Image (cartoon, grey):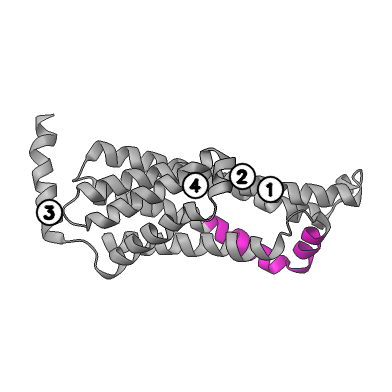
């Protein structure tokens, strides 16, 4: 279960990173609506590939979130459930944001109903939807930040994963949470994302390569049973 969670974690990060860093980074020219629209028209295959990645990423994230709930339920069932709640909200936001992502292609492909707009206006709309996509991703990362803090705490309280990874994940969540205040996040960027590189990468690799200490996981799961029954 731990290795499966790590695999879906990796898949979500890979597809999400491809969509945001490679596709959007290549197509979107900040402050230049004409160049952005031209890039979409010239690289429609890449755009559709990015859209596919934008859909796969939250799907993989959803599976990972459910697996994490089962994995950390022995530590604290209620807290693990709350973490899953934040994770699922984040996945839903990612899925909704993909609608804004596809809008620019609809605009640049044109249509009779768009004839009332000038070319410059259509180009501006294209860039605006990309801006909305970026803001949507920021909102998702805030919820994901809360999720990381809770998962980090559960790891720290567990006896089957290294506590240092739990601390790193809590710092990861705090780094994402500063997006609640965009000016502060802009001022701290990219230093607020350094903990994410350490925390998420270490957890992902540990789950994929090592997994969890099965004996200790069963021990903690067994210790949680009497508490559950007494409640």
Tell me whether circle 1 and circle 2 mark residues in contact (CB < 8 Å): yes
- Mark 2 is surrounded, within 10 Å at the Cα level, by few (under 14), some (14 to 19) or many (20 or more) other residues, namely some
Tell me whether circle 4 and circle 1 mark residues in contact (CB < 8 Å): no
Q: Which of marks 4 and 3 is nearer the N terminus?
A: 4
The relative height of residue 45 versus residue 112 in the rendered view (above or below) is below
The answer to whether residue 139 shows anywhere in this view is yes
The Cα atoms of the two marked residues, 4 and 1, are separated by 15 Å
Residue 4: % across, % down: 32, 62
Provide the secondary structure element on which disc 2 rests.
helix
Residue occupied by mark 3:
218
- The residue segment tinted magenta is 35-55
Q: Which of marks 4 and 1 is nearer the N terminus?
A: 1
Q: Which mark lies nearer to you, 3 or 2?
A: 2
Tell me whether circle 3 and circle 1 mark residues in contact (CB < 8 Å): no
Q: Along the horizontal axis of the image, is 103 left or right of 194?
A: right
Find residue 131 and name its label: 1
The question of residue 53 being in magenta is answered with yes
Q: Quadrant of residue 110?
A: bottom right
The Cα atoms of the two marked residues, 4 and 2, are separated by 10 Å
Q: Which of marks 3 and 2 is nearer the N terminus?
A: 2
The question of residue 176 being in magenta is answered with no
Find residue 32 and name its label: none
Residue 196: % across, % down: 42, 56
Residue occupied by mark 2:
135
Residue occupied by mark 4:
141
- Residue shown at the point (61%, 62%) measured from the top left: 50
Provide the secondary structure element on which disc 3 rests.
helix
């Amino acid at each position: 279960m731990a290795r499966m969670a790590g695999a879906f974690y990796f898949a979500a990060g890979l597809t999400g990173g491809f969509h945001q860093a490679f596709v959007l980074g290549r197509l979107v020219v900040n402050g230049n609506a004409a160049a952005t629209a031209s890039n979409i028209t010239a690289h429609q295959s890449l755009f559709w590939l990015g859209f596919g990645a934008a859909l796969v990423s939250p799907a993989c994230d959803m599976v990972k979130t459910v697996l994490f709930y089962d994995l950390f339920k022995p530590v604290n069932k209620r807290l693990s459930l709350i973490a899953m709640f934040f994770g699922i909200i984040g996945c839903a936001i990612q899925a909704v944001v993909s609608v804004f992502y596809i809008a620019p292609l609809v605009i640049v492909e044109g249509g009779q109903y768009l004839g009332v707009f000038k070319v410059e206006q259509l180009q501006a709309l294209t860039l605006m939807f990309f801006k909305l996509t970026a803001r949507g991703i920021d909102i998702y990362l805030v919820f994901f930040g809360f999720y990381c803090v809770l998962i980090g705490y559960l790891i720290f309280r567990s006896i089957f994963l290294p506590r240092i990874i739990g601390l790193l994940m809590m710092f990861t969540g705090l780094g994402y949470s500063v997006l609640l205040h965009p000016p502060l996040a802009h001022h701290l960027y990219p230093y607020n994302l350094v903990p994410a590189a350490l925390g998420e990468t270490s957890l992902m690799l540990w789950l994929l390569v090592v997994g969890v200490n099965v004996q200790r996981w069963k021990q903690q799961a067994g210790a949680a049973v009497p508490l559950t029954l007494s409640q």
